Image (tube, rainbow, N blue to C red):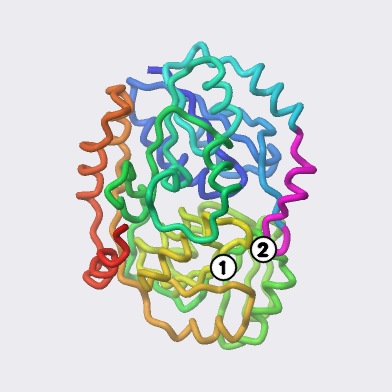
Amino acid sequence: MKLLYGVQGTGNGHIARARIMAAAFAQRDDIDVDFVFSGRAPERYFDMEVFGNYQTLTGLSFIYKDGKVRKWDTVKQANIRQFIGDVKRFNTSQYDLLINDFEPVTAWAAKRQGLPSISISHQAAFAYNVPKSGNSMFDTALMATFAPTKHKIGVHWYHFNQPIIPPFVVDKAISHSKSNHILVYLPFENIDDIRDMLEPLADQTFVCFHPDIEQASTEGHIQWNPTSKVHFHRALQSCGGVVANGGFELSSEALQLGKKLLIKPLHGQFEQLSNVFMLHSLKLCQPLFQLDTDVLEEWLSSPENEPITFPDNANLLIDWIKQGNYSDTKTLCETLWKHVQYGDKTRERLLSLAI
């Protein structure tokens, strides 16, 4: 079976999910996969060895500044002519199926050329009846047209009796690795604004990763690091808590490790607002709607989260993909959710969230 796998490259969460899938595909000899990424300059990708001879395209991406989606800037920078040309030039004839994680070029090329396609993404979950916050008619239309596919499987922290599967999370807690530092990952915020929030809390060590940092350095109690998969996950394993934007993958990893979360959703990004809404409803995060030292200081004394165990083996999903009956999701979903273990308090709160 020959698969085309399209991945949105704007944020690291899509790539992190694709890494888990790529590692699982690499263990099999019955499926061949070509990965395509778009939405980021080619030189800005890192730790991509697992994807082999991957391809990058311009695609479409959102412009962020100071923690906000700049919709007008997004429209202005979009090279529609390039996008349409890439869609028309992309040849899907050698593939049996497209798997898509919110990547628009491969989605539209597959639609145009009649290649079977399926979305497996967190964004796909919002096509179903799940908790949402801040979504407008524009957001609904965007989700439906940005990267259209014939079939959709959502990825979320609960199924809500919909065609939704849990995230795959590989990292397991290491009991002897606990430290007192706080991991800070706010890639869409201005570095000076982050520094202003952290500097007054001199008794707390912060380990910060940011895409604009080119070389590691230390400023008193603040450590600044360039983005790196290995170093980031080492810091995540041993941290005492995570301050981050509202992306899905990092939150999922932190939830499995039982790390407390202080989450600042991107303004104008309803997916992240919805993530914070759900996590806060489950008392698994504290919202941070602006960079605020007082809120951060109060959160530092909050307790750890109850860990959530998510599945770590994607082979059940790959077997389902190979079978080819993409309208039948019931058995797949039921099987994968049996591998999820919630804490007692989280399970009780989920019942009140059921919609």
Instruction: Please state, as top left, top right, bottom left or bottom right, where the N terminus lies in the image.
Output: top left
| Residue pointed to by mark 1 | 264
Density class for disc 2 (Cα within 10 Å; few <14, some 14-19, many ≥20) is many
Question: Is 78 inside the magenta-drawn segment?
Answer: yes
Residue 145 image label: none
Q: Tell me: residue 157, above or below residue 352.
A: above
Q: Position of residue 31 (x, y in %)?
A: 37, 22
Q: In which quarter of the image is residue 296?
A: bottom right
**Disc 2 and disc 1 in contact, CB within 8 angstroms:** yes
- What type is the residue that disc 2 sits on? Gly
Give the SS element for disc 2. Answer: loop
Label 2 vs 1, first from the N-terminus: 2
Residue at x-position 54% and y-position 28%: 107
Magenta-tinted stretch = 65-79
Q: Position of residue 136 (x, y in %)?
A: 57, 53
Residue at the extreme front of the image, as rendered = 137
* Quarter where residue 141 is shown: top right
> Which residue is drawn at the image coordinates 62% and 87% (left, top)?
202
Query: Tag 1: Cα neighbours inside 10 Å, few (<14), some, or many (≥20)?
Result: many
Q: Does 106 sit left or right of 284 as displayed?
A: right
Q: Residue visible at 30% across and 52% down?
A: 160
Please tell me which residue lies in front, 235 or 276.
Answer: 276
Q: Please state the horizontal and vertical placement of residue 247, each as a whole percent of the image.
A: 52, 56
| Residue occupying the far top of the picture | 93
Q: Name the residue under label 2.
A: 67
